[in-house]
Each structure stands twice: as C-alpha cells, then as structure tokens.
Amino acid sequence: MFKRFLRRPAVQSGLGWGVAQYMRLIKATTRWDILHPERVEDIIAGRKGVIALTWHSRFLMLTSAWKREYQLPYVMISRSRDGAVVAATCKALGLQTLRGSSKKRGKNKGGEEAAAGAVTAVKSGGCVVITPDGPRGPRQRLGDGPLRLARATGAPIMPCTFAVARRKQFDSWDKFVLPKLFGKGLIIWGTPVTISKHATDEELENIRLFIETEMNALLAEADKSLGHIPVAPA
C-alpha cells in the first residue's frame, strides 16, 4: 500500500520539493572546503559541454559544488519510482532531467533515449551529471556509459567527491549519506579526463579503471579527513 502511495505524482512532487529545499539548506549551512578547484576552473570557464560524475551515496550534496553561472546541469535519472522523486527534486532545483537506464531482462528502460538526450545536452554546452553506480549498484563501480558519452562528444569528464562531518549513513546498497545541517563539508575535484573519439574499447577500460580508482581514493580521503571510516566499493 505504501508503494502505491509513493507512485502518486502529487506525492512524488511533494517529496521532491522537500528534498530540494533540504539540499539548498545543506549547501547554505555547511562550511565547505574545496580541494583541487584548479583542476576544473578552466573547463567550467570555457562554457562548453562537460560530464560530471559522483557516487550515488553523495547525491544530496551535488548542488553544493555547482554555481548558477556554471553550465546548465542535466541529471541522468532512471525511470524507477525512486527516480521519479529524484526527477521532482531536480525540477524544484531548476535542473533538467534525462530519464532512462540500461535495458533489463529485455525491457526498454529508456536508455537509448536518455543517451541521445545526453549527447544533445553536452553538444549544446550543458553539464550532464551522472551517478555512475546508480540506481541499484554495484556500489562505487563505474560503468562505461559516461566514457562512451565522452568519446562520442569530446566533452571532458569531471569526477567529484563529497563528504560531511555531521551525517547519518544508511545501511543501503550504496551506504547512502544524509548530511546534517550546520556541519563541515569537503568537496574534492578529481582529474578531468578527455577521451579521443578514436579510443578503442581496451583504452576505454583502462580509463574506466583510472577514474573509478581515483574516485574511490578521493572519497576515502574525504571521509577520513572528516572522521569517518571509508566505505569500500562493492
């Protein structure tokens, strides 16, 4: 019965609005430190399309790293019930959404449409935001979707990780982090990566491993610096 209740568009919109306001409060009340902003300053200032990556567990901190004058964000979201709430959250934040994920058991999950939309968004100068281990994991493992998007568009990939001192961590598949108000936070930008349109699948795999390894190392660094035990990848 509760699941049916969550399927109602009005409920999803209400939850999304509430989450959006909480994300705004987190951004405003957290004392944020930023490491390695110089890695992405020129890319962002260039006003060209980019691809931003962060792990699913840190979704509620996404807006804390992005300013209004940056490229317009397009967030990749699944067509699941949870995805509907995230889509409503993005709408309340003034963000664009791309709904879809890879096929499962022969069912069309809208992945092709979302991928086409992502290409258009990047080529028009937008920022496509992807949580590459969502919506269901495995935790902190990077698929090749963002890399293929980067190869097709020539847009740089910008990894970003987040941590906060005051938080509640859930025992979910991704070890989701709920940040608490009025705490200390850390944003770490990873190494931007640009992929040649001529890159082979073998080269893509090497790049995938590099990005995944760095994102997990930076996440562990951020968590440890704020007094938490790092979460291991699945």
Image: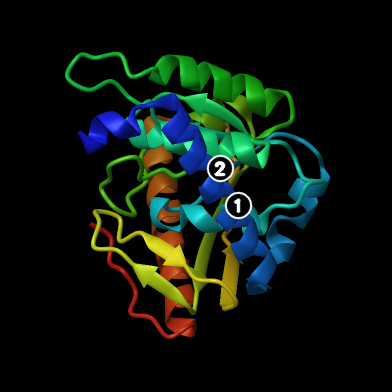
Q: Nearer the viewer, residue 221 or 199?
A: 221
Q: Secondary structure at mark 2?
A: helix
Q: Is residue 122 above or below residue 194?
A: above
Residues at discs 2 and 1 in contact (Cβ within 8 Å): yes
Residue 164 left/right relative to 91: left
Q: Amino acid at mark 1?
A: Gln
Q: Nearer the viewer, residue 93 or 232?
A: 93
Q: Amino acid at mark 2?
A: Trp
Asked whether residue 77 appears in the rendered view, the answer is no
**Residue 96 at x, y percent in the picture:** 62, 30
Residue 51 left/right relative to 131: right
Q: Which residue is mark 2?
A: 17
Name the residue: 33% across, 19% down.
109
**Residue 84 at x, y percent in the picture:** 43, 31
In the rendered structure, find residue 160 and report the number of the disc placed on it. none
Asked whether residue 13 appears in the rendered view, the answer is yes
Q: Secondary structure at mark 1?
A: helix
Name the residue: 34% across, 68% down.
169
Residue 6 falls in image quadrant: top left
Residue 226 left/right relative to 111: right
Residue 107 falls in image quadrant: top left
**Residue 219 at x, y percent in the picture:** 44, 67
**Looking at the figure, which quarter contains the C terminus?**
bottom left
Within-10-Å neighbours for mark 1: few <14, some 14–19, many 20+:
some
**Residue 160 at x, y percent in the picture:** 55, 57
Q: Is residue 58 above or below residue 109?
A: below
Work out how far the residue at label 2 is from the one at label 1, CA to CA, in angstroms.
6 Å
Q: Is residue 138 above or below residue 144?
A: below
Residue 137 falls in image quadrant: top left
Q: Which residue is mark 1?
A: 21
